[in-house]
Each structure stands twice: as C-alpha cells, then as structure tokens.
Image (cartoon, helix red, strand yellow):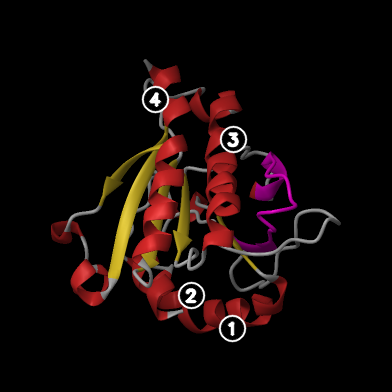
C-alpha cells in the first residue's frame, strides 16, 4: 500500500471543490478489509488535504452487480470489486446517480504478468470511454475535459512492461511522467514509472 499512497498523495484533483469529489476504489474482494483498514488509517493525511483523484485499480468483481460502498467515515470514498476479464464497465461503477463517468482513472502496480495485460488495458479503456457518452459532464464546460488514465507501476520485467506499453498505446495516447514532476520514490531510479494516457477516441472526438 505504500506505493499506492505515494502515487495518490502526489496527484492534484481536477475538481473545483474537493469536498464534492468522489473516489471509487477497486480491487479483489479478498483485500476489501485491508483496503478499508488502509483508508481508516490514512484518510486524514491522504485525503483530507485534497491531494488525490478519483481512482480505478486492479481487482475482481462478482457478477452480482458492482460492489457496495463501505466505510462510513469516508462517505465520498467507495470500494467495489471489479473483474477485468468478466465484468462490463458501466456508469454504475461510479456509484452515483449524478456522475456517469470519471475524471481520472488511476491504477497502481497492476501489471506484473502477461495474462493481466489485455484485460487490464481493456478495463482502463472502458472506464475512460464512459466520458465519451457522458453529455452531462460537459453541460457547463466550454472545453471538453477527457478522462485521464494514470498508470503507476513497479518495473519488474522488461518484457511484461513492453507488452503492456504496446497494448496501452493502441487505445491511448501515452506520455511518461518526467522525473521533475515525480517524488523520488516514484522515479525510475527507485524502480517505478508513471505514465499518463488519454483515449485516442477522445482526442479524435475533440478535433
């Protein structure tokens, strides 16, 4: 969880009022209690300062419907399970009747073997693509604000990383975050790398 916290704490929110921000956390169901404990222990330092962004990460989801929110102490933070391989990403994932898409999708250390690459990239693309059909998100905006996908990962295998980057670049325009905008613990010299992606479909629609 240290890497996750470090990444989230160094992201600035793209919302005018941080108190109105909502956060959806996803992971496998068996870590749900661990996630909640982590929230309970870090909520005041990691989120009360407003230095995070709506997120989506690795996880498993049962077919019974998108998961349930937990943790009354964090009313704007919701945990749900999500299975990249079997679940469809729909607006219900936001857990809100008002919000039908995400401002940002943040994934922390999700890809570490070949089997995860394609399902993970597809889930990221599907989550970001919700913004394309969300007319309400742009009702009062003069400029379109696409959903931004931020991927932070530990560099374990060059082959797996290259496989992920190739697949991710098929759906996204991709930029690597430079050392100048990252804390020391998230830089390649520490064994980590952060990339930012915007859907190719999003940029085409904005042209």
Calculate the distance from the C-alpha at mark 2 to the C-alpha at mark 3.
28 Å
Q: Can residue 49 be seen? A: no
Q: Earlier in the sequence, mark 4 or mark 1?
A: 1
Nearest to viewer (mark 1 / mark 3): 3
Horizontal and vertical percent for residue 174?
33, 42
Residue where numbered disc 4 is placed: 203
Nearest to viewer (mark 4 / mark 2): 4
The reply to whether discs 2 and 3 touch (Cβ–Cβ < 8 Å) is no
Nearest to viewer (mark 1 / mark 2): 1
Q: Secondary structure at mark 4?
A: helix
The reply to whether discs 4 and 2 touch (Cβ–Cβ < 8 Å) is no
The reply to whether discs 1 and 3 touch (Cβ–Cβ < 8 Å) is no
Bin the neighbour count of mark 1 within 10 Å (Cα to Cα): few under 14, some 14-19, many 20 and up. Answer: few
**How many numbered circles are shown?**
4
Residue where numbered disc 3 is placed: 130
Mark identifier at residue 43: 2
State the residue at coordinates (37%, 73%).
156
Q: Is residue 196 left or right of residue 178?
A: right
Is residue 158 covered in magenta?
Answer: no
State the residue at coordinates (58%, 45%).
122
Bin the neighbour count of mark 4 within 10 Å (Cα to Cα): few under 14, some 14-19, many 20 and up. Answer: few
Calculate the distance from the C-alpha at mark 1 to the C-alpha at mark 2.
10 Å
Calculate the distance from the C-alpha at mark 3 to the C-alpha at mark 4.
14 Å
């Amino acid at each position: 969880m240290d890497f996750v916290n470090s990444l989230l704490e160094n992201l600035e929110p793209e919302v005018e009022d941080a108190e109105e921000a909502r956060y959806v956390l996803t992971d496998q169901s068996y870590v749900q209690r661990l996630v909640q404990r982590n929230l309970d222990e870090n909520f005041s330092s990691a989120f009360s300062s407003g230095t995070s962004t709506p997120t989506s990460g690795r996880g498993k989801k049962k077919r019974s419907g998108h998961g349930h929110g937990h943790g009354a102490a964090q009313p704007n933070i919701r945990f749900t399970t999500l299975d990249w391989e079997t679940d469809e990403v729909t607006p219900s994932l936001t857990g809100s009747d008002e919000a039908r898409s995400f401002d940002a999708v943040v994934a922390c250390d999700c890809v570490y073997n070949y089997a995860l690459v394609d399902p993970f990239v597809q889930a990221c693309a599907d989550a970001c693509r919700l913004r394309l059909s969300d007319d309400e998100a742009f009702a009062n905006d003069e400029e379109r604000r696409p959903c931004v996908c931020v991927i932070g990962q530990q560099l374990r295998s060059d082959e797996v990383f290259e496989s992920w980057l190739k697949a991710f670049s098929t759906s996204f325009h991709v930029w690597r975050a430079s050392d100048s905008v990252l804390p020391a613990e998230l830089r390649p010299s520490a064994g980590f790398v952060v990339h930012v992606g915007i859907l190719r479909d999003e940029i085409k629609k904005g042209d």
